Image: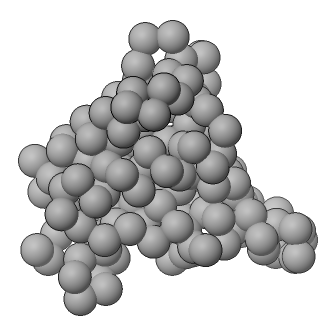
Amino acid sequence: MTELTLDAAQKIATATLKTAREKAFKPLSVVVYDARGALKALLSEDGTSLKRAEIAMGKAYGALSLGVGSRALHKMATDRPYFIASATHAVGGQLVPVPGGVLIKDAQGRVLGAVGASGDTSDNDEIAAAGGIEAAGLVFDTGA
């Protein structure tokens, strides 16, 4: 696979929510972007708070923009807060540097896009996103 298809994005989004339900996580919003940053899928479960989708978008878009999972962005925010502040500005404020933004890769390691999940703890958001990517037969990169 050289690009993330709509079908694959929908599978990832649906499987992310399925993973969350299987693990009894709080209601999530999930977003999937392709490698060029185009929105491919966005789902919000009943009961999510008002801005969860936007937070999920910031996790995924930030990971995609800087080429690392948002767990790595979280470490950068701790170690180099001025860099993350500048990067956030450079991407128009659409960068949320906490776990839950996961890169989607193919078997050869090429970035196909990113998933963002928000609604539970950041760690659980990341678990759900990784589960969605795996369920679609692709490789996830959390930035760990």
User: Which residue sits furthest front?
Assistant: 23
Seen in the image, is 85 located left or right of residue 144?
right
Residue occupying the point 60% across, 17% down: 49
Please indicate, yes or no, whether residue 64 appears anywhere in the rendered image.
no
- Foreground of the two, 21 or 85: 21
User: Which residue sits furthest top?
Assistant: 47
Could you say where residue 131 lies in the image, as x and y percent from the top left?
36, 52
Seen in the image, is 46 located left or right of residue 101?
left
Residue occupying the point 69% across, 54% down: 98
Residue occupying the point 69% across, 68% down: 73
Q: Total marks drawn?
A: 0
Seen in the image, is 26 located left or right of residue 141?
right
Among the 4 quarters of the image, the one containing residue 44:
top left
Could you say where residue 90 lies in the image, as x and y percent from the top left?
67, 65
Coloring scheme of the render?
A: one colour
- Quadrant in which the C terminus is drawn: bottom right
Could you say where residue 129 lies in the image, as x and y percent from the top left?
42, 50
User: Which residue sits furthest bottom?
Assistant: 108
Residue occupying the point 63% across, 49% down: 123
Does 35 sit above or below residue 118? below
- Foreground of the two, 105 or 54: 105
- Quadrant in which the N terminus is drawn: bottom left
Please indicate, yes or no, whether residue 79 appears anywhere in the rendered image.
yes
Does 127 sit above or below residue 112? above
Seen in the image, is 5 located left or right of residue 92?
left
Could you say where residue 79 lies in the image, as x and y percent from the top left?
88, 76
